Amino acid sequence: MSESTVFVLDPTSKPKVLGLKLAERPADIRGLTVGFLDSGWWSFGVVLERYRELLAERFGIRAVTYHKKKERPAPKELLDELATKCQIVINGLAN
């Protein structure tokens, strides 16, 4: 019988605190512009139009912008554009 090495990972270690904060969430999305950042998986595009319809009908959003990632991670210029034009961004997989 040959010897083997077994690695045991301990998931109980303390988490690293990175000092990052989540972006503030708007209390109401009525009148806001929502950006969709498609990760490139086929199914996100399939449901995108329905998301747009529901957000407009139920929550009164003003507009939607759509971008599909051509590279990962998304380029800084694309993220800056979304941050400038949109108050909310949904980065989707929808797999």
Image (spheres, grey):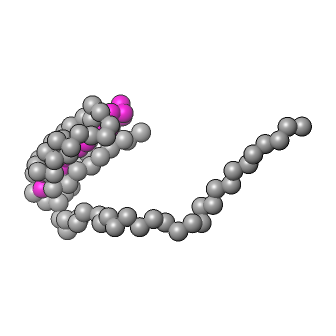
Q: How many marks?
A: 0
Which quadrant does the C terminus fall into? top left
Left-right relation of 61 to 3: left
The image quadrant of residue 47 is top left
Residue 93 image position (x, y, % from top left): 36, 41
The image quadrant of residue 51 is top left
- Residue 45 visible within the image: no
Say which of 10 and 55 sits in front.
10
The image quadrant of residue 52 is top left
Q: Is residue 53 above or below residue 24?
A: above
- Residue 22 visible within the image: yes
In the image, residue 19 lies in the stretch drawn in magenta: no
Residue plotted at (23% across, 66% down): 24
Q: Which residues are magenta?
A: 32-43
Residue 16 image position (x, y, % from top left): 45, 65
Residue 57 image position (x, y, % from top left): 18, 51
Residue plotted at (19% across, 57% down): 59
Q: Is residue 57 above or below residue 75?
A: below
Residue 30 image position (x, y, % from top left): 13, 59
Residue plotted at (68% across, 54% down): 8
